């Protein structure tokens, strides 16, 4: 993607006027926050980059109500600092992907919502969209839309909050978001199972999630990835427990007892556990490289099979989060054939979806970056996109492919 200039409006009204002018002139707009995910999507030429960075600041936060509202360009770090002062957090545990994309900007809360970024706690707390309570945004006609207020005639009945989450800036420029927040756990411990194979780890994670231990994170790192994450002892299967200190201690023993058939076990205290899960949310084991990186979501018991089938033909390495249902797969083979293999394998193993997070411009031009949609879903998506952005000015490189066609 190349852009002629970047403009960061200081108000919602100014942003709306910029969009109106772009729609009238047929100018494509790249929507950006801190620019940390600009390399995700198809390369495209935009007349202008419309940045939400000028729309910054927390507008309302009452810790007792567990709700925070902020302008879309507010850095996530600023919000997390305010939450930490009140011992609160985003339960969905957003990751920071700067290391994957090589970006220098700061992640913003609007981009977090637009990309639906969710970390390891998603298996019990839901995704970013589940914590998103309200939005304000500028649509492709330059009109300001507020959830619960004005509803456009041709999208009546749609949940605009959930619609904007994960839309990657293809439906509108978010200007303000409201999120549910939760108290931060008093204590955290991670039980580490050493030396399990990928298949055995999938069974162990499933068994752990089936106990009453209330596991809040379940991930598996093959040996090469575990070493990079600072863990010794071969492959590492990670099971996180959070809550009051006494409860965590009791549940840890309960979990140990339930996994008597597991290989060697050890436990990481709070000081070691927290940074480890932060690494996984940031996908730090695969940061700093240039190899193709896929984010694959499948049924938890299918993740290791999908990765193994693909890697036998392409080479590479993977690690697994969300009890095995989220596969971060870095390939040695950067070809169109390898990309096709990824999606063919997912379909053959029960279905799911894959997003190409990192690849060369040539590959991102040649293959679908986002998961292709079924024809009926693609047609519905296109009707929604046309309702919100009739002139097609927003982020054309982040639309989903469907058999050569593009749909929002």
Image (cartoon, rainbow, N blue to C red):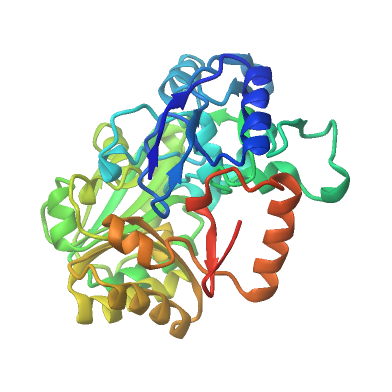
Locate residue 24 relative to residue 319 in the image: left or right. Answer: right
Q: Residue at x 61, y 41 (%)?
A: 26
The reply to whether residue 102 is visible in this rendering is: yes
Could you say where residue 76 lies in the image, as x and y percent from the top left?
45, 26
Q: Quadrant of the N terminus?
A: top left
Q: Is 155 rendered above or below residue 313?
A: above
Q: Is 395 rendered above or below residue 345?
A: above
Q: Residue at x 26, y 60 (%)?
A: 292
Locate residue 274 relative to residue 299 in the image: left or right. Answer: left
Q: Residue at x 76, y 49 (%)?
A: 387
Could you say where residue 407 lies in the image, as x and y percent from the top left?
60, 61
The reply to whether residue 66 is visible in this rendering is: no
Question: Which is more toward the observer, 349 or 230?
Answer: 349
Q: Going by the picture, which residue comes out furthest to the bottom?
A: 348
Locate residue 302 relative to residue 287 in the image: left or right. Answer: right
Could you say where residue 201 lies in the image, as x and y percent from the top left?
31, 69
Q: Quadrant of the C terminus?
A: bottom right
Locate residue 9 relative to residue 146 in the image: left or right. Answer: left
- The count of marks equals 0
Could you say where residue 337 lies in the image, as x and y percent from the top left?
30, 78
Q: Is 267 rendered above or below residue 67?
A: below
Q: Using the rendered view, name the quadrant where residue 175 is placed.
A: top right
């Amino acid at each position: 993607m190349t852009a002629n200039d970047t403009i960061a409006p200081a108000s919602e009204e100014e942003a709306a006027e910029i969009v109106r002018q772009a729609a009238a002139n047929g100018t494509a707009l790249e929507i950006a926050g801190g620019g940390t995910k600009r390399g995700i999507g198809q390369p495209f030429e935009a007349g202008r980059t419309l940045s939400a960075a000028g729309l910054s600041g927390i507008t309302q936060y009452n810790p007792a109500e567990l709700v925070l509202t902020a302008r879309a360009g507010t850095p996530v770090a600023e919000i997390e600092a305010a939450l930490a002062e009140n011992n609160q957090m985003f339960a969905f545990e957003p990751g920071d992907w700067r290391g994957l994309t090589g970006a220098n900007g700061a992640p913003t809360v609007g981009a977090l919502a637009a990309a639906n970024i969710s970390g390891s706690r998603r298996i019990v707390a839901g995704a970013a969209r589940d914590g998103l309570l309200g939005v304000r945004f500028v649509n492709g006609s330059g009109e300001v839309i507020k959830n619960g207020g004005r509803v456009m005639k041709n999208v009546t009945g749609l949940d605009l909050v959930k619609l904007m989450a994960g839309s990657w800036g293809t439906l509108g420029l978010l200007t303000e978001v409201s999120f549910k927040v939760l108290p931060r756990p008093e204590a955290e411990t991670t039980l580490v199972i050493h030396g399990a194979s990928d298949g055995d780890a999938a069974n162990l994670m499933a068994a752990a999630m089936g106990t009453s231990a209330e596991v809040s994170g379940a991930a598996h790192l093959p040996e090469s990835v575990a070493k990079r994450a600072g863990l010794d002892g071969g492959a590492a299967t990670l099971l996180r427990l959070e809550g009051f200190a006494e409860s965590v201690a009791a549940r840890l023993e309960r979990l140990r007892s339930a996994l008597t058939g597991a290989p060697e076990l050890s436990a990481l205290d709070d000081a070691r556990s927290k940074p480890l899960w932060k690494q996984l949310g940031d996908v730090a084991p695969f940061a700093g490289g240039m190899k193709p990186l896929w984010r694959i979501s499948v049924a938890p018991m299918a993740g290791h099979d999908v990765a193994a089938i693909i890697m036998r033909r392409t080479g590479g390495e993977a690690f697994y989060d969300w009890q095995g249902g989220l596969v971060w797969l870095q390939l040695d083979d950067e070809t169109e054939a390898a990309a096709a293999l990824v999606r063919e394998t997912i379909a053959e193993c029960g279905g799911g979806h894959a997003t190409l997070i990192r690849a060369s411009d040539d590959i991102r031009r040649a293959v679908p970056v986002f998961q292709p949609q079924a024809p009926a879903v693609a047609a519905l998506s296109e009707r929604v996109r046309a309702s919100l952005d009739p002139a097609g000015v927003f982020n054309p490189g982040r639309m989903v492919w469907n058999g050569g066609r593009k749909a929002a």
